């Protein structure tokens, strides 16, 4: 429960994304499964646990994140334009 309450962790973000689609109980079981796998790897490989971070899904697929933001803004009646940053 502590893992999903933390807003800036990979497991917390994973829980909220999955709970929106599948429901809270199924998402909780999925998080417990991910934790069990992570614990096994930590004990088996003798490596420290490394959290992927709350922005893992955004870094993994930035195009999908932009499509989601545009869709959400459009549902609010806003128009959004993205321009690349030039250095």
Image: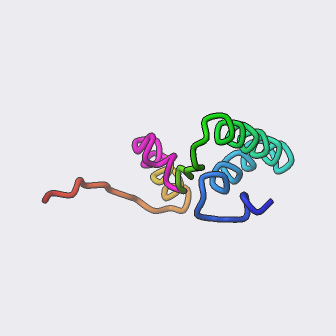
Majority SS type along the magenta span? helix
Q: Is residue 40 above or below residue 67?
A: above
The quadrant the N terminus occupies is: bottom right
Count of marks overlaid on the render: 0
Q: Is residue 56 above or below residue 8?
A: above
Q: State the image quarter where residue 16 is shown.
A: bottom right
Q: What x and y, as percent, mark residue 15?
A: 71, 51
- Of 39 and 20, nearer the camera is 39
Question: Residue at the location (60% across, 58% down)?
Answer: 9
Colour pattern of the rendering? rainbow
Q: Within the magenta stretch, is there residue 58?
A: yes
Is residue 31 left or right of 9 when viewed as pictured? right
Question: Residue at the location (23% across, 53% down)?
Answer: 84
Q: Is residue 42 above or below residue 53?
A: above
Q: Which residue in the rendered view is the most extreme toward the left?
A: 87
Q: What x and y, as percent, mark residue 28?
A: 81, 48
Q: Which region is colored magenta?
A: 54-67
Is residue 59 left or right of 2 when viewed as pictured? left
Q: Which residue in the rendered view is the most extreme toward the right?
A: 25
Question: Residue at the location (13% across, 59% down)?
Answer: 87
Q: What x and y, as percent, mark residue 79?
A: 40, 59
- Of 28 and 68, nearer the camera is 28
Q: Which residue in the rendered view is the most extreme toward the front?
A: 46
């Amino acid at each position: 429960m502590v893992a999903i309450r933390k807003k800036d962790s990979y497991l917390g973000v994973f829980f909220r994304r999955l709970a929106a689609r599948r429901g809270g109980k199924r998402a909780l079981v999925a998080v417990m499964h991910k934790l069990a796998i992570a614990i096994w790897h930590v004990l088996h490989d003798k490596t420290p646990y490394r959290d992927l971070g709350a922005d893992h899904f955004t870094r993994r697929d930035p195009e999908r994140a932009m499509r989601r933001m545009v869709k959400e803004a459009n549902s609010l009646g806003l128009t959004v334009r993205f321009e690349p940053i030039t250095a």
